Image (cartoon, rainbow, N blue to C red):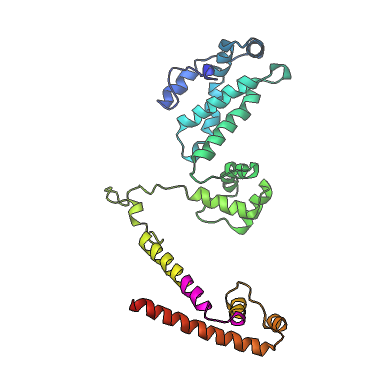
Amino acid sequence: MAVLTPGVGVAPEGNLSRYLQEIRKFPMLGPDEEYMLAKRFRESNDFDSAHRLVTSHLRLVAKIAMGYRGYGLPMGELISEGNVGMMQAVKRFDPDRGFRLATYAMWWIRAAIQEYILHSWSLVKMGTTAAQKKLFFNLRKLKGQMQAIEEGDLSPENVKKIAEDLDVSEADVISMNRRLASPDHSLNAPVRMDGEGEWQDWLVDESDDQETEFADREEMSNRRHLLGVALKNLNQRERHILTERRLRDNPVTLEDLSQQYGISRERVRQIEVRAFEKLQKSMRNAVIDQNLH
């Protein structure tokens, strides 16, 4: 599609006023001429015809792009994306369907611009479903109609009305409104007007440093080792009851263990307590022995 570039002589990213003046020089096409050019391109792959179709609709692209000025993105980039959509429309346009190219191209132009806005407006991925995209591009208009232009969250009544109008959940409305009210900010932005210091300089890393993480892993490994040694000092029944009662995520009940060993629940509890005391004593002695050596 590179051959379908408008070739206006000035890029939209440059002097916008000059660009808008330049595209007015391309003549509008009448229905018959447009049909013949589209037919020639479709049947003979005549790119001169395609070029004329594209350039005759550059004013339409600019007009549609102007409607998306409120998203804080450069107008030149919006027009450039719209031009891409226009070229896609020319490539797929079938003149025999009976409608004008502009009617067909409007969808492609809007789709290209909206897709660019969704990818460029925020680093956080948003508008991944058709309903969310509809919400993103209609929320401001509906808020304006309701005169709900105040800062902060929408009132419950407005949230409900917007959700019903756009057929989305109220949670989606609240979330999107907050995202639109809080655009991304660079962590490299200066804290003060004089440019001294950046916001990232004030961020606190609450995670443990490597030394702390290594020490914690060593401590946990040592405890597991001491526990394993201490458990060997218990007899088989004590070890099993203590493990089932104290070392499992879902402890076995006294009743289940009493039936398994043919003893009372009270007796199981006594064995558990005695085994735990022996375990504690064994681990304390092992720690003292480690410190002495």
Q: Position of residue 79 (x, y in %)?
A: 50, 28
Does the rendering let one see residue 234?
Answer: yes
Quadrant where the N terminus sits is top right
Q: On the rendered structure, is 199 left or right of 263?
A: left
Which residue occupies 49% across, 75% down? 229
Instruction: Tell me the quadrant of the picture where the C terminus can be found.
Output: bottom left
* Residue 177 picture location, percent across and down: 55, 51
**Magenta stretch contains residue 237:** yes
Q: Is residue 148 visible?
A: no
Task: Compare residues 31 and 225 and report the one nearer the observer.
Answer: 225
Give the residues in magenta. 224-238
Q: Quadrant of residue 263?
A: bottom right
Q: Nearer the viewer, residue 15 or 236?
A: 236
- Position of 208 relative to 118 (above/below): below
Note whether 26 is above or below 249 in the view shown.
above
Residue 135 x, y percent position in the rendering:
61, 45
Asked if residue 178 lies in the magenta stretch, the reply is no
- Could you tell me how many numbered marks the image carries? 0
* Prevailing secondary structure of the magenta residues: helix
Q: Examine the rendered structure and indicate whether residue 182 appears above or below residue 234.
A: above
Pinpoint residue 122: horizontal percent, then vertical percent: 49, 44
Q: Is residue 40 left or right of residue 234?
A: right
